[in-house]
Image (cartoon, grey):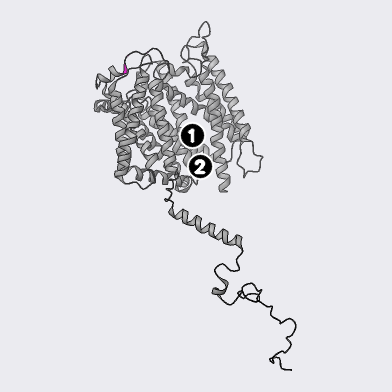
């Protein structure tokens, strides 16, 4: 029978269901029905899928109508560093203006003092106040404008409308607080000078701040491959700060000439000829402290990589002499500091000695070497901590000062701050000795000590040694025994261990 004949039976399985169309099943992969018009829009799509699609279209339309969100500029490393500089400078301004923080009744009216106008009593004080806030204005504007592509006009507007008024407000607040501090003088000239310094700092940022920040960041990033490079940069900044404290600056050309002529006239150690025995002993102590400041610079330089790693001792000596000359030249503008060729030579030799020690003891210190370096370190402290030979002891011991920070109240607090930082470095060398013994490099065969245990051990040893020294000073009249020096001994030794541990960890990663 012909399959196409009317009434012919259809094979089972090929029969088409009646009503095949929009609601029929159809074959797999084929559309349901005969076309788009028959199916209608959305045909064959479940209701919940259509609702989700409609919701997505509505959300996109709402987002298109919403104003564009302004993304906040991330805090780049340059901005973060400048923010820390601004905070540190502001804290330094407050500290230097209000130390020793003894407050009492108000000594005068702030309005009357400001109404008296600007009166420059000391030209050096005025210049010091100007220079004090130059880095504050520079860093404060840089913390907001760095790496953001601001034009000079926009940066100048931000500095003039926000940074300079903020610095002026800080200066006025500090001067007002000085009315409640006995021994401090409040004056409108200080407010004007510090505001002028902030304005100069803002101008410096507008002119070349971004370029300077980018170059400084490039130098820091190049040193990031070696932790010693970053530590060396930071440490040299600390040494420079110690060398120019108490920042009693003098712009007088006559002072420049007098100091330069004195340094040339005395030559190397020529100043000792005109000193008494007590003055010579004090001079020996100053040279010992200076050598202690330069010695860690040599230790860190011994860990540098690149071209510096291939330097001979002649190159290191030349670089150390140049560094010493730069630091001593900075003292030409400080009234209470006197540059000396002897200091240049002693500092350079100490840096070379530190570099040589770092090269020789590249893999740490064995017990005999650690003990030997401890003896050398303790002997170097003799002119710093002990009275001159032949001085008579007191009949009764002097009382011990148990108030931390009490030395800051005697004399110039900024000069005392430099002395405290120097003592911190002195005992930091003790921590370096402990770390070189307890923390051998990880690539060496021996066991590796714990950083925490080493820091605690060094801190305890520093406390013990400094307490022993301060206890002996109770029987002499040349040094004041105080708990501040004891605490500095422990803190400095612990910090020395932490610094060495960072170098060791970074070196192990490179290997």
Closer-to-camera residue (494/117): 117
- Picture quarter with the N terminus: bottom right
The image shows residue 136 at horizontal and vertical percentages of 36, 33
The image shows residue 507 at horizontal and vertical percentages of 55, 44
Q: Is residue 107 magenta?
A: yes
Say which quarter of the image contains residue 493: top right
Q: Earlier in the sequence, mark 2 or mark 1?
A: 2
Q: Secondary structure at mark 2?
A: helix
Q: Is residue 352 magenta?
A: no
The image shows residue 95 at horizontal and vertical percentages of 41, 24
Q: Secondary structure at mark 1?
A: helix
Q: Is residue 265 left or right of residue 430?
A: left
Which residues fall within the magenta stretch? Answer: 104-110
Q: Is residue 394 left or right of residue 156?
A: right
Magenta portion: prevailing SS class: loop
| Position of 282 relative to 433 (above/below) | above
Residue located beneath label 1 in the image = 296
| Position of 15 relative to 229 (above/below) | below
The image shows residue 215 at horizontal and vertical percentages of 38, 45
Closer-to-camera residue (72/120): 72
Residue located beneath label 2 in the image = 227
């Amino acid at each position: 029978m012909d399959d196409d004949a009317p009434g012919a039976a259809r094979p089972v399985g090929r029969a088409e269901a009646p009503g095949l169309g929009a609601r029929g099943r159809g074959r797999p992969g084929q559309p349901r029905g005969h076309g788009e018009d028959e199916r209608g829009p959305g045909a064959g799509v479940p209701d919940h899928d259509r609702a989700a699609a409609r919701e997505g279209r509505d959300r996109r339309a709402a987002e298109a109508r919403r104003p564009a969100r302004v993304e906040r500029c991330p805090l780049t490393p340059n901005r973060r560093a400048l923010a820390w500089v601004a905070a540190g400078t502001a804290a330094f301004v407050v500290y230097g203006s209000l130390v020793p923080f003894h407050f009492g009744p108000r000594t005068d009216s702030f309005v009357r003092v400001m109404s008296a106008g600007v009166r420059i009593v000391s030209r050096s004080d005025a210049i010091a106040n100007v220079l004090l806030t130059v880095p504050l204005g520079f860093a404060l504007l840089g913390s907001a404008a760095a790496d953001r592509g601001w034009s000079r006009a926009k940066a100048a507007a931000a500095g003039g409308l926000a940074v300079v008024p903020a610095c002026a407000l800080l200066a006025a607040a500090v001067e007002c607080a000085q009315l409640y501090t006995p021994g401090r003088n409040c004056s409108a000239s200080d407010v004007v000078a510090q505001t002028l310094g902030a304005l100069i700092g803002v101008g410096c940022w507008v002119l070349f701040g971004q370029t300077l920040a980018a170059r400084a960041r490039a130098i820091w990033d190049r040193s990031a491959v070696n932790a010693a490079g970053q530590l060396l940069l930071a440490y040299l900044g600390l040494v420079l700060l110690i060398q120019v404290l108490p920042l009693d600056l003098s712009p007088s050309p006559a002072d420049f000439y007098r100091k330069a002529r004195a340094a040339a006239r005395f030559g190397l150690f020529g100043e000792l000829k005109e000193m008494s025995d007590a003055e010579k002993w004090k001079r020996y102590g100053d040279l010992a402290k200076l050598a202690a400041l330069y010695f860690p610079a040599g230790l860190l330089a011994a860990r540098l990589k690149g071209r510096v790693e291939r330097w001979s001792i002649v190159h290191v000596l030349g670089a150390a002499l140049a560094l010493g000359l730069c630091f001593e030249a900075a003292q030409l503008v400080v009234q209470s500091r006197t540059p000396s060729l002897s200091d240049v030579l002693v500092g350079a030799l100490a840096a070379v000695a530190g570099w040589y020690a770092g090269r020789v003891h590249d893999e740490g210190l064995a017990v005999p070497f650690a003990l030997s370096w401890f003896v050398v370190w303790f002997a170097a402290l003799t002119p710093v901590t002990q009275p001159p030979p032949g001085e008579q002891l007191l009949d009764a011991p002097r009382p011990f000062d148990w108030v931390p920070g009490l030395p800051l109240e005697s004399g110039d607090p900024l000069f005392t701050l430099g002395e405290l930082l120097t003592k911190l470095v002195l005992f930091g060398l003790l921590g370096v000795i402990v770390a070189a013994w307890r923390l051998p490099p990880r690539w060496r065969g021996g066991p590796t000590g714990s950083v925490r245990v080493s820091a605690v051990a060094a801190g305890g040893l520093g406390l013990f040694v400094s307490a022993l020294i301060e206890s002996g000073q109770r029987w002499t009249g040349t040094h004041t025994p105080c708990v501040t020096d004891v605490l500095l001994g422990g803190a400095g030794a612990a910090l020395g261990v932490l610094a060495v541990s960072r170098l060791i960890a970074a070196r192990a990663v490179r290997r």
